[in-house]
Image (tube, rainbow, N blue to C red):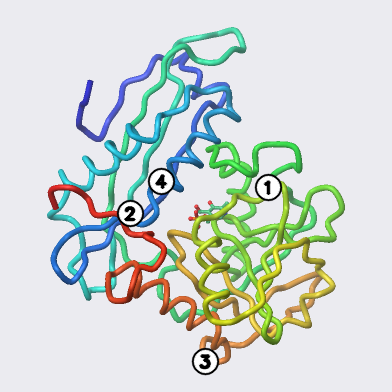
Amino acid sequence: MVTSGADVTLPLAAVCLHYGQAIFEGLKGFEHPDGTVHVFRPRDNAGRFRRSALKLAMEPVPEELFLEGVFLAVRNNRRFVPECGAGGSLYIRPVEIGVSAELGLKPSREYLFAVFVVPVGSYFAGRGVPVRLLVREDLDRAAPQGIGDVKAAANYAASLRGTVDAKARGYTEVLYTDARTKRFLDESGASNLFAVRGATLITPASPSILPGITRLCVQQLARDMGLLVEDRPVSVDELPSFDEVGLSGTAAGIIPVHSITYREEEIVFGDRAAAPITTRLSAMLTAIQRGEAADAYGWCEAVPGT
Ligand code: PLP
């Protein structure tokens, strides 16, 4: 059954409210110069949505149904897709929750899969404001053998207090280290980290980070630029040696990090002008997403009927 509307009614004993069976995805749709709307790498999101569901003992949504829901939401809201060239996009949020009423601790018997969309500009309000990250060794977002590598609502609940505190202290976000040793960089609250040293682009490998789809793009586009790509654990001790540090994510895009504060010391990487590789990666990605550059890897999928 397909329904529409922004509200859902749930039993107070719904599993998602008590035992946290709630997962989501985030992807974007763009108007191309010919007026059609394309969604960026939706099959990758479908795969991650499936992995999230399995990890939380939920019913996985088949890829075809996921795509149908995404395309339907975009098509029905075609008028809200920002115009090509205006810099915005349509953010698409698929969500799945366990809706059965259960008091005993067990998986839900029924699930709700829904998709809603919102026209957006960029995530970090006022692009151009320097991104300053704060390493918090006293806070963990996710455990190595937990659920940090899937898009479970619980991970965001775990990170909220850190984000609120960081913002209150003038930082953009928290940068998490690995929960076990605190020696290795993980990721930020809602985006992955990468670093550039000379002609090498480095992405922190970790079992507790969300494997970002933008991160995959960063790695591929860096290779296309002729950089060597290393995906490996990255020690906090390496921070001062980086020429550039950047964040990647669907909402954030690819943006340079101005500084990282670690144990009271602010390590400054510079501003946008001093981050030539990050800036170039961002321009390459945006051009592909907006249909202004060749889509060599078939990342853009046309929404039928737009
Ligand atoms: N890490 C976290 C915790 C996120 O919430 C996100 C955003 O979805 C990312 C990384 C980046 O993932 P993606 O590039 O697939 O948007």
Circle 1: element type: loop
Give the number of the mark in front: 2 or 4.
Answer: 4
The answer to the question of whether label 2 and label 1 lie on touching residues, with beta carbons closer than 8 A, is: no
Pick whichever of labels 2 and 1 is earlier in the sequence: 2
Q: Amino acid at mark 4?
A: Arg
Give percent across and percent down for residue 28: 34, 56
Disc assigned to residue 141:
1
Pick whichever of labels 2 and 3 is earlier in the sequence: 2
Give the number of the mark in front: 1 or 4.
Answer: 4
Nearer to the camera, 287 or 129: 287
Q: Residue at x 31, y 38 (%)?
A: 115
Nearer to the camera, 289 or 142: 289
Q: Amino acid at mark 1?
A: Arg
**Residue 30 vs residue 52: left or right?**
left
Work out whether 222 lies above or below 198: above
Give percent across and percent down for residue 210: 60, 50
Residue for badge 3 = 273
Q: Residue at x 79, y 77 (%)?
A: 265
Q: Amino acid at mark 2?
A: Tyr
Q: Amino acid at mark 3?
A: Ala
Give the number of the mark in front: 1 or 3.
Answer: 3
Q: Residue at x 76, y 43 (%)?
A: 144
User: Is the residue at mark 1 in contact range of ligand 1, meaning its CB lies under 8 Å from it?
Assistant: yes
Disc assigned to residue 43:
4
Work out whether 285 lies above or below 143: below
Residue for badge 2 = 91
Work out whether 29 lies above or below 15: below
Q: Quadrant of residue 186?
A: bottom right
Work out whether 285 lies above or below 180: below
Pick whichever of labels 1 and 3 is earlier in the sequence: 1
Q: CA distance from mark 1 to mark 4?
A: 26 Å
